[in-house]
Structures are given as C-alpha cells and as structure tokens.
Amino acid sequence: MKGIAIKFFLILIVSVLSLSFAQAQTKSLFADVRSALKAGSSKELSQHFHDNIELNIKGESGNYSNVHAEIYLKEFFKKHEPISFEYAHQGSSNEGLKYAIGNYVHSEGTYLVLIRAKKIDGKEKIYIIDFSEE
C-alpha cells in the first residue's frame, strides 16, 4: 500500500512539473512575441515561426515560408511603425493550441492581432498571425 502511494505521489509531481514547464514555455513565447511587436522587429518575431506560417494583414492572406513572412512583416512594420502592443486575452484549447489576442497601435490607428501557436517538435511555434484593422 505504501509503495502505491509513493508511485502515485511521484506521478503527481512529474505531471505538475510538466504542466508548469509547458505553461512557462508558452508565457515565454508570448512575452517574446509582445516584445518583438512593440519593437516592430520582424527578425525577433520570426524566430518563433513554424517553417510555414499563415499571415493575414488587412484581409490579404497567404501561406509563407518563415523567411518570406519575416520579409513581408519587415515591410509592414516600416509602413506601420509601432507605438505599443498589449495583449487583451490569452488562452489555449483542450488540444493544446495556444492563442493570444492583442492591440497593435501605430500612428494611423490600431490593428487587432490574433496569434496562434502549437507545439511542434517539443517547442511552441507560431503558425498563424492575423492583423485586422479596428
């Protein structure tokens, strides 16, 4: 009986530590993304892209390699230099998909930004970014 209790306790500890690590990794991802968007750094942002990413800016949507998405966002940031970026909401699905919604403020207005990420090869990677004008 004592052996079963110890095994249960060890399984519980491993589960809690694994969940804590996964949450910390996701928080780190979204913290890095927030910093990149505030700075208007496509290079910093692209470090968190999956190999292929769906990018939607003002209704123009396409699937791009991470390299081409970085170039496209570099031009976007030049035309719409950031004033600020803050998250309004973050969450996850039961399937482990992560998302964040934020406001990207630039001199001419605000974009609502939706970011979706999922675990790929053990790392959280962005696979969709959507910039919609408010």
Image: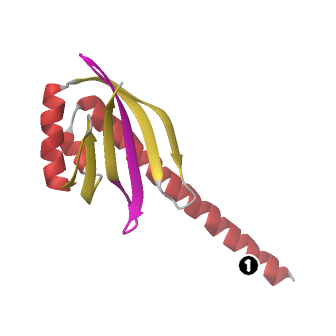
Q: Which residue is mark 1?
A: 7
Q: Residue 41 at x, y = what percent?
A: 21, 37
Which amino acid is tagged 1? Lys
Q: Residue 126 at x, y = what percent?
A: 34, 52
Against 34, residue 125 (above or below) is below
Q: Main secondary structure of the magenta part?
A: strand
| Crowding at mark 1 (Cα within 10 Å: few <14, some 14-19, many 20+) | few
Q: Residue 20 at x, y = what percent?
A: 57, 56
25 left or right of 44 in image: right
131 left or right of 4 in image: left
Q: Nearer the viewer, residue 6 or 86?
A: 86
Q: Please tell me whether mark 1 sits on a helix, a strand or a loop.
A: helix
Against 48, residue 131 (above or below) is above
At 14% from the left edge and 26% from the top edge, which residue is drawn? Answer: 79
- Write the start and end of the magenta stretch as one range: 105-126
Q: Is 115 in the magenta?
A: yes
At 29% from the left edge and 52% from the top edge, which residue is drawn? Answer: 48
